[in-house]
Image (cartoon, grey):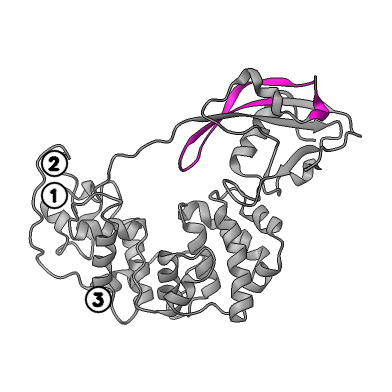
Amino acid sequence: MTLAGESMGRKRKRAPAQASVPSAAALLAWYDRYRRKLPWRAAPGEQADPYRVWLSEIMLQQTTVKTVAPYYARFLERFPTVERLAAASLDDVLRAWAGLGYYARGRNLHACAQAVVARHGGKFPATEAALAELPGIGPYTAAAIAAIAFDAPASPVDGNVERVVARLFAVEDALPEAKPEIRRLAATLTPARRAGDFVQAMMDLGATLCSPKKPACALCPWHEPCAARARGDAETFPRKAAKREGKLRRGVAFVVQRADGHLLVRTRPTKGLLGGMTEVPTSAWTHDFDESDALVAAPRLARGSWRRVPGVVQHVFTHFPLELVVHHARVGAAAKAPAGMRWIAPGEIADAALPNVMRKVIAHALRDGGRAR
């Protein structure tokens, strides 16, 4: 696959006939030599641990390998088995998950562990169908676990595999409409033997050689049968429809510190955005937020002592960007938390189940006028 030879604005060329059929053996030979060493990946000749495969696949959804690796190591140390994870409290799980984002995954992870223990005696089922019945496991994750952990001839398609297949067959339809066709084509490539290694080889190929920009086509084991490489516009695949950005939402966050350094927090509702996570009190996040009414939503214990922190905190969620005005207040060491809220000690903040947006808010307030003790 070479660099794009023509811009998307020019007339698209018809995909040439493939010079050869993509060979699973060729890709597996490449994988045996160049496979990545990943903390959740079994060594050559070893049987993969379904628990570790499942954990890594959930963590890797919408997140990069580089980001996941340290979280995975800490999570596995804290919850080394599915039984330990199932027995833990949801708050403990969310604290360990904090920072990875997409927090519904953390809640589903806990629910899935409990289901594996309750329904299957702590053993992950080996079939796609049975895996897909567990909380938080969709078709892709079920196929990935079945293939990698149990060597079933399944064909999971993540972003890397999607790119490889779209280029290999020069799939002209734009994403997301092209996804069913890409999944169908991917299934035609999966061999009956070494399916787990083949799946991981496809992922490694997309992550290393068949990269979004400047793919290393000359080194690719599928150099010859790749239609996009032959036509000279590999970088233009997969085709993507124009992305629609969500409308900006705004609100206000309240950072309250006691004289002894404790911080006022509460737990968000279990369902919905950032469900079950810890947060400082905030107003609703709306498109028509009016800053003149910001203090209406403020916790009552600090009435009259609020100071607006200069600037705003910006954060981008999957479907919308967010801007938060921050107000900061200090209260006496004997102040009681309002109903539904609680105090956490300075030493507990680092391990609290605070999502990244809340850590930004706290850092913004403390950097300007307060400090952790």
Q: Contact (CB < 8 A) between labels 1 and 2?
A: yes
The image shows residue 140 at horizontal and vertical percentages of 40, 65
Residue beneath label 3, please? 25
Which residue is at a point 55% across and 31% down the rendered structure image?
286
Magenta stretch encompasses residue 348:
no
Q: Residue 298 location in percent, x, y?
A: 73, 28
Which residue is at a point 61% across and 35% down the rendered structure image?
360
Q: Quadrant of the C terminus?
A: top right
Q: Overall secondary structure of the magenta stretch?
A: strand
* Quadrant in the picture for residue 226: bottom left
Q: Which residue is mark 1?
A: 232
Cα–Cα gap, marks 3 and 2: 32 Å
Mark closest to the chain's N terminus, 1 or 3? 3
Quadrant of residue 145 within the rendered picture: bottom left
Three-letter code for the amino acid on which mark 2 is drawn: Glu
Amino acid, disc 3: Ala
